[in-house]
Image (cartoon, helix red, strand yellow):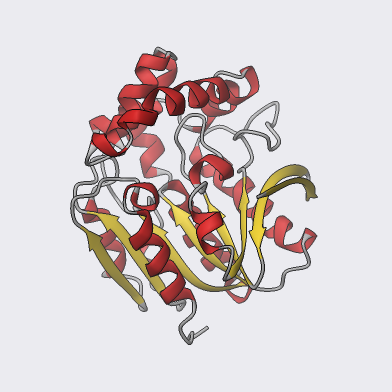
Amino acid sequence: MERTRLKTGIVETSLCRQGAGDPVLFIHGSGPGAGGQSNWQLALPALGDRFLCLAPDLVGYDQSTHPDPAPRGPREWMRLWVDQLIGLLDALNIEKVHLVGNSLGGAIALNLLIEKPERFGRAVLMGPAGAPMPATPELSCIWGFYRDPTVAAMKNAIRMFAYDEGFIADRLDDIATARVQAATRPEVARSFANMFPEPFDQSVSELIVPETLLERIQHDILILHGVQDRIVPLSGSIHLIERLPNATLTSVPRCSHWVQIERAELFHAEVARFLRQEKNT
């Protein structure tokens, strides 16, 4: 896996890349300490033999630019993320790319499909935001990490991502420590505080993609969602497939919000199968 830094419009983007073939843009989620490498550490090596895998850090995360002053609230950040990722494709001279979006990354993917439909092929959304939903207690705990930014609090948050804690039990200390180190850098904490301010229900509402815009998206979309997802409920993906003209939903049993990690083999197989099919767009 190679990490590079590119000028993408008015910001700089830290990018992890691996493989060769049709390009796929992987968009990470919103958790404190998240980034392209941590979110897609299993997917890039697994899929890099078939695709050119691109996993940037979103602006405001990890090693990409942290604006100062920062945008306020998800709506303002969404504008910046969309511009950043279109700028990344331009900087890499990539005309068209498939999308894979996790959680927040799913909502960003939907906004990209709406704004620049000609730049994207197929899309895989995993436990996506973008549908009406409450700020669940689990999501509020994760976004509220900075009330008590400790390793213990991070462990508690990470446990919520998994259906079976056993699969990460032997790595939980290392994962939590690394995430806290990334999340508590001053610029990362400042960005996050402005990204998802309380009340969290308001922040969630700013991520909702209007139904009239969902209905305009003609791309082929596969949604993967853990049945036991306590962070972004499965009902959100049902809302999306009822409004996206060419979307299908695969619900994953015995799985929570980390399909790409908790059910990695299934995730890799489904992504490869879907992205290699003939496409409508």
Is residue 102 in view from this perspective?
yes
Residue 244's image quarter? bottom left
Say above or below: 260 vs 152: below
Q: Nearer the viewer, residue 185 or 196?
A: 185
Q: Going 31% across and 45% down the picture, which residue do you hit?
A: 257
Say above or below: 67 vs 2: above
Q: Going 33% across and 27% down the picture, which residue do you hit?
A: 157
Residue 116 lies left or right of residue 102; in this view the side is: right
The x and y percentages for residue 82 are: 61, 54
Q: Nearer the viewer, residue 206 or 196?
A: 196
Q: Going 42% across and 16% down the picture, which residue do you hit?
A: 151
The x and y percentages for residue 17 are: 66, 54
Q: Nearer the viewer, residue 26 or 220?
A: 26
Residue 274 lies left or right of residue 113; in this view the side is: left
Q: Nearer the viewer, residue 258 or 204?
A: 258
Say above or below: 192 vs 22: above
The x and y percentages for residue 62 are: 62, 33
